[in-house]
Image (cartoon, helix red, strand yellow):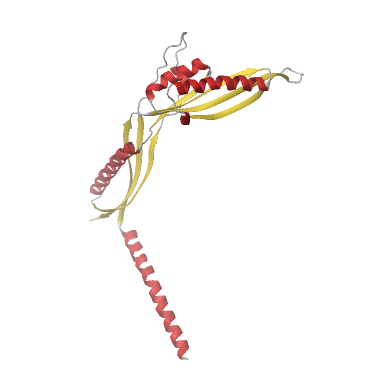
Amino acid sequence: MKTLFRAAALSLLLATTTAAPVLAQDARADTMFNASTLNLSAYGETKVAPDMATINLGVLVEAKTAAGAMAANGARMNQVIAALKAGGIAAKDIQTSGLNLNAQYVYAQNEAPKLTGYQASNQVTVTVRDLTRLGPAVDAVVAAGANQVNGISFGLADPTAAENAARIAAVRALAAKAELYAHATGYRLQRLVSLSEGGGYSAPQPVPMLRMMKSAAPMADTAVAPGELNVRIDVTGLYELGR
């Protein structure tokens, strides 16, 4: 009987001890739920000149045989890569992004397709970390045999400073908006309960390089205008209000 009594007392003590923090959490939750809050979003932006670029270029050749197409393509691509390296582009910044070999056919009505040859394509993505080399690099690879220049995009090697500037602007905008709403509704800001962010710098969509290249012969220097990147940070904050 004593054993049963002690077990029951121990169970009651454990239940009381376990329930205490839960009740405290519920009390805090109820307090927060019953408080007047303000949930707002804002953003900050900064503009910065890019310091790097990525271009996609390649070689497309046709030959009667698959081996002939691949051999001709490989020889010309080797010249293109050599031209890039001679122009100051590091080997680590040259990456093969596509290699294709396709049979070419002629189709006629009521006739079986006729094989006419093979087409070999080799694409590389090149990162240019010194923008003064960008135009000359494009000229050099075209002179070396590249016949496909598909696009260019600009970026930042390290966007941290630009993002931090946008963060500061975003938080200031959020605080100003919160003060405005609080004043307009007859409240005052008590505290910032939570803050979250999204966004970051976004490079422009790749622009076809052929638009930037002169078609006159002999080839004129390729002019490339990097412009500016828009770095944007979005923030969302929850404020507690008071009278």
Residue lying at 50% horizontally and 22% vertically, measured from the top left: 82
**Displayed quadrant of residue 110:** top right
Determine the residue located farthest toward the bottom in the rendered image. 1
* Position in image of residue 241 (x %, y %): 27, 54
Residue lying at 62% horizontally and 21% vertically, measured from the top left: 71
Residue lying at 37% horizontally and 22% vertically, measured from the top left: 132
Looking at the rendering, in which quadrant would you find the C terminus? Answer: bottom left
Q: Is 32 placed above or below 7 here? A: above
Q: Is residue 81 visible?
A: yes
* Position in image of residue 215 (x %, y %): 47, 11
**Displayed quadrant of residue 166:** top left
Q: Is 93 placed above or below 107 here? A: below
Residue nearest the observer in this picture, 95 or 16:
95
Q: Is residue 221 left or right of residue 31?
A: right
Q: Is residue 149 visible?
A: no
Q: Is residue 65 left or right of residue 192?
A: right
Q: Is 151 placed above or below 243 here? A: above
* Position in image of residue 63 (x %, y %): 65, 17
Residue nearest the observer in this picture, 117 or 195:
117
Residue nearest the observer in this picture, 50 or 232:
50
